[in-house]
Amino acid sequence: MIVATGLHKVFNAGTASEKIAIAGLDLKVDTGQFVAIIGGNGAGKSTLLNLLGGAFLPDRGRIDIDAVDVTQMREHARAALVARVFQDPMVGTAPTLTVQENMTLALMRSEGRRLRPALTAVRRERFKQALSVLRLGLENRLDARAGELSGGQRQALSLAMATLCPPKLLLLDEHTAALDPRTSEYVMEATVSMVENGKLTTMMVTHNMQHALSYASRIIMMDAGRIVADIGSDEIRGLTVGDLVARFRIKDDRMVLST
Protein backbone atom coordinates (compact mmCIF):
# COMPACT_ATOMS: atom_id res chain seq x y z
CA MET A 1 0.00 0.00 0.00
CA ILE A 2 1.09 3.55 -0.79
CA VAL A 3 0.15 6.18 1.81
CA ALA A 4 0.77 9.91 1.39
CA THR A 5 -0.27 12.09 4.31
CA GLY A 6 -0.41 15.89 4.43
CA LEU A 7 1.95 16.44 1.49
CA HIS A 8 2.96 20.02 0.77
CA LYS A 9 5.37 21.26 -1.89
CA VAL A 10 6.05 24.91 -2.69
CA PHE A 11 8.46 26.19 -5.32
CA ASN A 12 10.19 29.59 -5.01
CA ALA A 13 8.71 30.11 -1.55
CA GLY A 14 8.61 33.71 -0.36
CA THR A 15 9.20 35.18 -3.81
CA ALA A 16 6.93 36.85 -6.34
CA SER A 17 6.98 33.62 -8.35
CA GLU A 18 5.92 31.38 -5.45
CA LYS A 19 4.01 28.33 -6.67
CA ILE A 20 2.09 25.97 -4.42
CA ALA A 21 2.40 22.70 -6.34
CA ILE A 22 0.97 20.28 -3.77
CA ALA A 23 -1.36 21.58 -1.05
CA GLY A 24 -2.04 19.23 1.85
CA LEU A 25 -2.59 16.12 -0.25
CA ASP A 26 -3.70 12.83 1.33
CA LEU A 27 -3.78 9.63 -0.70
CA LYS A 28 -3.95 5.87 -0.17
CA VAL A 29 -3.36 3.40 -3.00
CA ASP A 30 -3.98 -0.29 -2.40
CA THR A 31 -1.48 -2.92 -3.50
CA GLY A 32 -2.06 -3.90 -7.13
CA GLN A 33 -4.27 -0.92 -7.93
CA PHE A 34 -3.85 0.90 -11.28
CA VAL A 35 -4.52 4.60 -10.70
CA ALA A 36 -4.78 7.12 -13.53
CA ILE A 37 -4.10 10.75 -12.58
CA ILE A 38 -5.73 13.40 -14.74
CA GLY A 39 -6.02 17.18 -14.53
CA GLY A 40 -5.09 20.36 -16.33
CA ASN A 41 -1.60 21.78 -16.77
CA GLY A 42 -0.16 22.89 -13.45
CA ALA A 43 -2.55 20.72 -11.44
CA GLY A 44 0.33 19.03 -9.62
CA LYS A 45 0.27 15.63 -11.33
CA SER A 46 3.95 15.31 -12.21
CA THR A 47 4.98 16.97 -8.93
CA LEU A 48 3.10 14.24 -7.08
CA LEU A 49 4.99 11.58 -9.04
CA ASN A 50 8.26 13.39 -8.33
CA LEU A 51 7.47 13.33 -4.60
CA LEU A 52 6.58 9.64 -4.67
CA GLY A 53 9.68 8.80 -6.68
CA GLY A 54 12.07 10.90 -4.61
CA ALA A 55 13.06 13.43 -7.27
CA PHE A 56 11.56 16.06 -4.94
CA LEU A 57 11.29 15.94 -1.16
CA PRO A 58 8.12 17.35 0.41
CA ASP A 59 8.20 20.51 2.51
CA ARG A 60 5.80 18.82 4.89
CA GLY A 61 4.01 15.48 5.09
CA ARG A 62 4.93 11.83 4.92
CA ILE A 63 5.12 9.06 2.31
CA ASP A 64 5.02 5.35 3.17
CA ILE A 65 5.58 2.56 0.65
CA ASP A 66 4.55 -0.81 2.04
CA ALA A 67 4.86 0.52 5.60
CA VAL A 68 8.37 1.92 4.94
CA ASP A 69 8.76 5.65 5.59
CA VAL A 70 10.51 6.95 2.45
CA THR A 71 9.74 10.65 2.98
CA GLN A 72 13.37 11.75 3.20
CA MET A 73 14.82 9.08 0.91
CA ARG A 74 16.45 10.46 -2.21
CA GLU A 75 15.61 9.06 -5.63
CA HIS A 76 18.54 6.63 -5.80
CA ALA A 77 17.69 5.24 -2.36
CA ARG A 78 14.16 4.38 -3.55
CA ALA A 79 15.36 2.60 -6.70
CA ALA A 80 14.61 -0.85 -5.30
CA LEU A 81 11.07 0.25 -4.39
CA VAL A 82 10.01 2.64 -7.13
CA ALA A 83 10.42 2.45 -10.93
CA ARG A 84 9.46 5.19 -13.36
CA VAL A 85 8.87 5.57 -17.08
CA PHE A 86 9.01 9.13 -18.43
CA GLN A 87 7.27 10.84 -21.35
CA ASP A 88 10.43 11.21 -23.45
CA PRO A 89 11.46 7.82 -24.95
CA MET A 90 15.08 9.00 -24.92
CA VAL A 91 15.24 9.46 -21.13
CA GLY A 92 14.85 5.89 -19.88
CA THR A 93 17.58 4.15 -21.90
CA ALA A 94 21.29 4.57 -22.63
CA PRO A 95 21.57 4.99 -26.42
CA THR A 96 25.14 3.70 -26.80
CA LEU A 97 24.43 0.49 -24.87
CA THR A 98 22.74 -2.55 -26.35
CA VAL A 99 19.26 -3.71 -25.43
CA GLN A 100 20.65 -6.43 -23.18
CA GLU A 101 23.12 -4.02 -21.56
CA ASN A 102 20.27 -1.64 -20.75
CA MET A 103 18.32 -4.53 -19.24
CA THR A 104 21.37 -5.45 -17.17
CA LEU A 105 21.46 -1.91 -15.78
CA ALA A 106 17.84 -2.37 -14.72
CA LEU A 107 18.83 -5.50 -12.80
CA MET A 108 21.71 -3.69 -11.13
CA ARG A 109 19.35 -0.94 -9.98
CA SER A 110 17.22 -3.42 -8.07
CA GLU A 111 19.72 -6.11 -7.10
CA GLY A 112 22.68 -3.90 -6.32
CA ARG A 113 26.20 -3.91 -7.72
CA ARG A 114 28.30 -6.98 -7.00
CA LEU A 115 31.34 -8.48 -8.68
CA ARG A 116 29.86 -11.10 -11.01
CA PRO A 117 29.38 -11.71 -14.76
CA ALA A 118 27.00 -9.08 -16.12
CA LEU A 119 25.67 -10.98 -19.13
CA THR A 120 24.93 -14.68 -18.81
CA ALA A 121 22.83 -17.15 -20.78
CA VAL A 122 20.32 -17.23 -17.96
CA ARG A 123 19.99 -13.45 -17.99
CA ARG A 124 19.66 -13.32 -21.75
CA GLU A 125 16.78 -15.76 -21.58
CA ARG A 126 15.17 -13.71 -18.84
CA PHE A 127 15.51 -10.58 -20.97
CA LYS A 128 13.98 -12.33 -23.97
CA GLN A 129 10.96 -13.43 -21.97
CA ALA A 130 10.42 -9.95 -20.55
CA LEU A 131 10.71 -8.29 -23.97
CA SER A 132 8.52 -10.80 -25.81
CA VAL A 133 5.46 -9.47 -23.95
CA LEU A 134 5.85 -6.20 -25.85
CA ARG A 135 5.27 -7.88 -29.24
CA LEU A 136 7.74 -5.53 -30.91
CA GLY A 137 10.45 -8.08 -31.71
CA LEU A 138 12.93 -6.65 -29.21
CA GLU A 139 13.61 -10.13 -27.83
CA ASN A 140 15.40 -10.79 -31.14
CA ARG A 141 17.45 -7.59 -30.98
CA LEU A 142 19.35 -7.98 -27.72
CA ASP A 143 22.60 -6.94 -29.39
CA ALA A 144 21.16 -3.82 -31.06
CA ARG A 145 22.09 -0.47 -29.57
CA ALA A 146 19.16 1.35 -27.95
CA GLY A 147 19.96 4.41 -30.07
CA GLU A 148 19.12 2.41 -33.19
CA LEU A 149 15.56 1.71 -32.02
CA SER A 150 12.49 3.77 -32.85
CA GLY A 151 10.98 6.02 -30.21
CA GLY A 152 8.22 3.51 -29.53
CA GLN A 153 10.68 0.63 -29.20
CA ARG A 154 12.83 2.63 -26.79
CA GLN A 155 9.81 3.49 -24.68
CA ALA A 156 8.79 -0.16 -24.64
CA LEU A 157 12.32 -1.05 -23.59
CA SER A 158 12.08 1.50 -20.76
CA LEU A 159 8.85 -0.17 -19.63
CA ALA A 160 10.48 -3.62 -19.69
CA MET A 161 13.42 -2.28 -17.70
CA ALA A 162 11.12 -0.70 -15.12
CA THR A 163 9.21 -3.94 -14.54
CA LEU A 164 12.03 -6.48 -14.90
CA CYS A 165 12.37 -6.59 -11.11
CA PRO A 166 8.81 -5.86 -9.97
CA PRO A 167 8.83 -2.58 -8.00
CA LYS A 168 6.57 -1.77 -5.08
CA LEU A 169 5.37 1.24 -7.09
CA LEU A 170 5.44 1.83 -10.85
CA LEU A 171 5.16 5.47 -11.94
CA LEU A 172 4.16 6.24 -15.53
CA ASP A 173 4.52 9.92 -16.43
CA GLU A 174 2.60 10.39 -19.71
CA HIS A 175 4.62 7.47 -21.04
CA THR A 176 2.66 7.17 -24.32
CA ALA A 177 2.24 10.89 -25.04
CA ALA A 178 5.21 11.14 -27.43
CA LEU A 179 4.24 8.06 -29.47
CA ASP A 180 2.14 7.71 -32.59
CA PRO A 181 -1.40 6.38 -31.95
CA ARG A 182 -0.70 2.81 -33.06
CA THR A 183 2.50 2.46 -31.01
CA SER A 184 0.80 4.18 -28.09
CA GLU A 185 -1.84 1.45 -28.02
CA TYR A 186 0.81 -1.28 -28.25
CA VAL A 187 2.68 0.22 -25.31
CA MET A 188 -0.52 0.66 -23.29
CA GLU A 189 -1.55 -2.95 -23.91
CA ALA A 190 1.92 -4.11 -22.88
CA THR A 191 1.71 -1.89 -19.81
CA VAL A 192 -1.57 -3.44 -18.71
CA SER A 193 -0.22 -6.95 -19.32
CA MET A 194 2.88 -6.28 -17.22
CA VAL A 195 0.90 -4.57 -14.47
CA GLU A 196 -1.64 -7.40 -14.26
CA ASN A 197 0.89 -10.23 -14.49
CA GLY A 198 3.12 -8.63 -11.87
CA LYS A 199 0.22 -7.36 -9.73
CA LEU A 200 2.03 -4.01 -9.74
CA THR A 201 0.80 -0.98 -7.85
CA THR A 202 0.76 1.64 -10.61
CA MET A 203 0.14 5.37 -10.88
CA MET A 204 -0.13 6.81 -14.39
CA VAL A 205 -0.29 10.50 -15.24
CA THR A 206 -2.08 10.91 -18.56
CA HIS A 207 -3.76 13.53 -20.71
CA ASN A 208 -5.45 10.76 -22.69
CA MET A 209 -8.74 10.32 -20.88
CA GLN A 210 -9.72 7.32 -22.99
CA HIS A 211 -6.65 5.52 -21.68
CA ALA A 212 -7.67 6.47 -18.15
CA LEU A 213 -11.17 5.08 -18.67
CA SER A 214 -10.09 1.94 -20.56
CA TYR A 215 -7.16 0.79 -18.49
CA ALA A 216 -7.25 2.20 -14.95
CA SER A 217 -9.11 0.72 -12.00
CA ARG A 218 -9.28 4.14 -10.36
CA ILE A 219 -9.13 7.71 -11.66
CA ILE A 220 -7.93 10.65 -9.59
CA MET A 221 -8.41 14.20 -10.82
CA MET A 222 -6.12 16.93 -9.51
CA ASP A 223 -6.44 20.70 -9.50
CA ALA A 224 -4.23 23.30 -7.80
CA GLY A 225 -2.24 20.63 -5.99
CA ARG A 226 -5.25 18.87 -4.53
CA ILE A 227 -7.33 15.80 -5.34
CA VAL A 228 -10.74 17.09 -6.42
CA ALA A 229 -12.26 13.81 -7.59
CA ASP A 230 -11.64 10.13 -6.87
CA ILE A 231 -13.51 7.65 -9.10
CA GLY A 232 -13.58 3.92 -8.36
CA SER A 233 -13.82 1.04 -10.81
CA ASP A 234 -17.60 0.64 -10.54
CA GLU A 235 -18.21 4.26 -11.51
CA ILE A 236 -15.56 4.23 -14.25
CA ARG A 237 -17.45 1.56 -16.17
CA GLY A 238 -20.37 3.92 -16.65
CA LEU A 239 -18.41 6.94 -17.85
CA THR A 240 -17.35 8.24 -21.26
CA VAL A 241 -14.71 10.79 -22.18
CA GLY A 242 -17.52 13.29 -22.75
CA ASP A 243 -18.80 12.61 -19.26
CA LEU A 244 -15.41 13.42 -17.78
CA VAL A 245 -15.10 16.64 -19.75
CA ALA A 246 -18.58 17.78 -18.77
CA ARG A 247 -18.49 16.59 -15.18
CA PHE A 248 -15.22 18.18 -14.23
CA ARG A 249 -15.27 21.10 -16.69
CA ILE A 250 -11.90 20.13 -18.07
CA LYS A 251 -10.45 22.96 -20.14
CA ASP A 252 -6.99 21.64 -20.91
CA ASP A 253 -6.95 21.31 -24.72
CA ARG A 254 -4.44 18.44 -24.61
CA MET A 255 -6.89 16.39 -22.61
CA VAL A 256 -9.97 17.23 -24.69
CA LEU A 257 -8.15 16.43 -27.94
CA SER A 258 -7.11 13.02 -26.61
CA THR A 259 -10.63 11.68 -27.04
Image: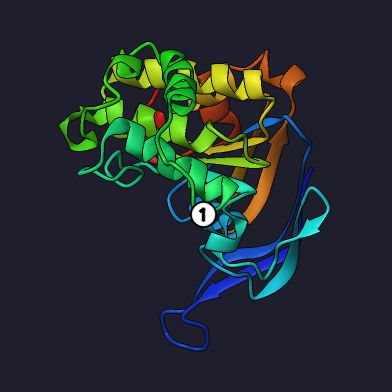
Residue 66, how many percent across, how many down?
79, 47
Q: Give above or below for 53 relative to 34.
A: below
Question: How many residues crowd around disc 1 within 10 Å: few (fewer than 14), some, or many (20 or more)?
Answer: few
- Which residue extends farthest left? 148
Q: Visible in this render: residue 233?
A: yes
**Left or right: 27, with 257 as reference point:** right
Q: Visible in this render: residue 43?
A: no
- Dot 1 amino acid type: Arg
Tell me what residue is drawn at x 40 percent, y 21 percent. Answer: 187
Q: Give above or below for 111 relative to 50.
A: above
- Which residue extends farthest right? 67
Tell me what residue is drawn at x 54 percent, y 32 percent. Answer: 163
The image shows a total of numbered marks equal to 1
**Quarter of the figure with the N terminus:** top right
- Which residue extends farthest bottom? 14
**Quarter of the figure with the C terminus:** top left
Secondary structure type for disc 1 = loop
Residue 71, how many percent across, how many down?
70, 66
Front one among 112 and 201: 112
**Left or right: 109, with 187 as reference point:** right
Q: Give above or below for 103 relative to 134.
A: below
Residue 242, how many percent across, how many down?
51, 21
Front one among 196 and 221: 196
**Left or right: 146, with 55 as reference point:** left
Q: Which residue is mark 1?
A: 113
Tell me what residue is drawn at x 59 percent, y 70 percent. Answer: 57
